[in-house]
Image (spheres, helix red, strand yellow):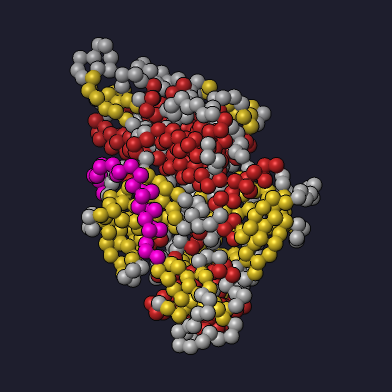
Amino acid sequence: MPPKKTGRLLNLLIALLHTELGVSRERLLRDVYDWAPGAEREREAVERQFERDKADLRALGAEISERQGYERADSVAPTSLYRIDPRQFRLPELEFTPQEQSLLALAGFACQGALAGAPARAALRRLEAAGALPDSPPSLVQPRLRIDDPRYATLADAASRRAPVSFRYYATSTGQEGERNVQPWGLGQRYGQWYLVGFDTMRGAPRVFRLSRLRGPITVGRDNSFDDPPSGAVHEQLERLADLPTQRARLRVAEGRALELRTRGWAPIADAEPDGGGAPDGWEVGEYAFQDLTVAADYLAGFGDAIVVERPAELAAAVVRRLEGALEVLGTPGAPVAPTATSRKTTPLDERLSRLIDLVPFLMQGPVRVEDVAARYGITPRALLQELAVLEYSGPTDLGGWQDFIEVHVHDGMVSLANAPELSRPRRLSIEEALSLQLGLQTLEPMASPEEVPALRALAAKVGAATVQGARSMPQVDVKAEPQRNAELLPLLRETISHGGTLRLEYLNPTKDERSERLINPLAVRSDGDRWYVDAFCHRVEGLRVFRVDRILLLEPADPHAVPADLSLPAEGPLSDRHVETILRLAPEALWVEHEYAAEDGVDLEDGSRRVRMRVASLDWLPRFLAQFGGSVALEGPDDAVAACREWLGRALNVASSR
C-alpha cells in the first residue's frame, strides 16, 4: 500500500479523535480526502473510499460512532456527525504493583511464535509507553508458550465475537472426516495440544476438538449469534479429557529396559504366567493402566522391541499397525511440491499504521536514539525515518481548513515528537494482544507460590478489561503447562536458582534407556508447550546441559558446588542438543509437529502434507518418535537415518507380532 493511504488514515483517525461533538461527512471529505464541494462526479468514489477507511480503523480498535446533529451553531440543517470517543480508544489509567509488573513482563516474554509472540510484545510495548511496566522482564524463570497454528487466531476471534464456525473434523475413533457446526466458547491446551471447546449444534452438546484434526477452511458466521458460554466451561470440558474410564493392559517388558514405562504406570505381576505359556528368559510380565486406547498405542509403539502387548487384543493390534505404518512410509519421496500460494493475514498498511499509532506516545516521552526505536519495533532505522515522515503531514484541521501538524524532531541520531495530543496516550489492547498475555500468565501458575496464584488470576482479568470491548469480549482460555509429572519440583528449582545453590538429581534418559545421578547448579527454568526444562551446569560432565523436569526421578538439595566464574547461558537462546538434521514429511493430521518440535523450512505438498527440516538430538531418538505416529510422519532423509530407523522398526515389528 502506498504511504499516501497511511497518511490519510492517520489524519482520519486524528480528526475523529479531535472533535467533541462530531465531524460532518462533508468536512471529512474536504479535509482528509481533498474533495472539493460541488465536485459531485467524484463524490461517490470518495465516499466509497471513506467507508473502506472506516472499516480499516475499526480493525485497529477504533469504534466510530455516527449520529444526526449540528456541526456549527449557525447550521440550518442536521447532518451525519462522526466521532471516536477517546475514552474507548485510549488505554485506561492502569496501576500495577511491582509484583504484577514482573508477572506481566514475564507472561509476555513467555509467548512464542508469530501468533502469540508478536501480539504479546505489542501489548507490552503499549503498557510500557503508558508507564505501567518496567523495561526488562525477569530472566531466571522462562516459561514458553508456542502458538503457530493459524486456526487458533481464527477461532479465538470467532469466540470473542460470539460467531459460530463450521469445519471438517477428523475423528480418530472412526478414522473419518465429518462436518461440524460449533458455537466456539474458547480454547485451551492439554498435553502439548491445542483444543477448541464449544457447543456442537449438530449434536446438541458441548464438545472438545483438537486443532490438529481440523481439516480444510473454517467458515465463520454472523457476530453475536449465541449467548455467552457458562463461566469456566472451557476448563470444565478440558478437564473431562482425563475422566475416561481406566483400562488395564497386560505387557511383557524386557528386563532392565523400558525404564520410562516402569515409572509411568507399568507394574510387574509376581509369579505371573503370560498368555500361551511361560515367560521367555529376559522378560517380565506386568500391568499397564491407560484410559485412551489411541493414546496408549502411540506411547507403547515408541518402546519398540522392549515390550510386547499381550492383551487386550485391540491394543496389541493398534501397536502393530503403528509400526507397520511407520515402516511403510519410511524413505518414500512423497507428493510433488504444491504451487506457491500467497497468503494475506496482515497487509503492510496494517502494520505501518498500527506501528505509527504506537510510536507517537512512546516518542512523546522524550528523545530516543533512532537505532533503539527501530530495534524496539523491528524495522530498520531508514524505514523508521520514512514512516516518521508521514507524521509530519498529519494533524487536526480546524473549521477554517488550517491544519496543525505533528512536530517531528530528528537531530544527531535522536528522535522525539511534540504537538500530538490526540495520540499521546497508547490505544487499548486488541483481543489478540490481551489473549496472548492471559495465556502467558497461565503458564506461570505451575511455578507460582500460593500467594502469587490469586495475583495471576486477578491480573488476567485486569488485562481483559483493557481491551476495546472490555472483559466480556474475551474468549475463555485454559492452559496447563505441566499436567503430567513433577510440577511440584518447580518451586524448589526456582528457589535454588535464586540463591545459586546445588541440587542432586536422579535422571531418566529414555533414549539411552538409562538412569543416572547428577549434581547440578540450575541456571534457568523454561517451558515449551506442556514440558518444563532446566538449563544447568552439570558437574559430572563439567558443562551446560538441559534436563526435562518430568524425567527427574529424585531431586534434593546438596552441598554447594562452585561453577566456573565466567559461566553464562548462550546469548542466542536456550540450550539445545539438537545436532542431527532430518527431513520429515507430515501428513495433514500431523501438521502440528512442525510447531511443537520447532521444525523449519516447511514446504506444502500437493496431497496436503508438508515437508520440513527438523534437528534432533540423535538417531537413537528418531525411530521411537516415528513409531508413535504410525506413518503420519515419514522420514525422507538423510540415508543413514533412514537405514537406522528401518532396522529399529523392523526389529520392533517382529517382536510386537510374536505375542
Total residue callouts:
0
Let me know if residue 470 appears in the view. yes
Viewer-proximal residue among 300 and 269: 269
x and y, in percent, of residue 596 in the image: 50, 59
Query: Would you say 217 lies left or right of 415 here?
Result: left
**599 or 142: which is nearer to us?**
142
Residue with the most extreme bottom position: 277
Q: Is residue 307 visible?
A: no
Dividing the image into 4 quarters, which one contains the N terminus? Answer: top left
Residue 242 colored in magenta in the image: yes
Q: Position of residue 185 (x, y in %)?
A: 32, 47
Residue under the image location 48 percent in, 37 percent down: 454
Residue ID at (53%, 47%)? 446
Task: Name the residue located 60 percent from the left edge and 33 percent from the top edge.
Answer: 135
- Snapshot quadrant of residue 613: bottom right
Question: What residue is rendered at 61% in x and 26% in y?
Answer: 367
Q: Position of residue 171 (x, y in %)?
A: 33, 66
Stretch in magenta? 220-246
* Looking at the image, residue 350 lies above or below residue 213: above
The residue closer to the viewer here, 154 or 396, is 154
**In magenta stretch: residue 442:** no
Above or below: residue 406 compared with residue 188: above
Quarter of the image for residue 325 reads: bottom left
Q: Residue furthest top?
A: 74
Query: Viewer-proximal residue, 300 or 229?
Result: 300
Q: Position of residue 397 (x, y in %)?
A: 39, 21
- Residue furthest left in the image: 77
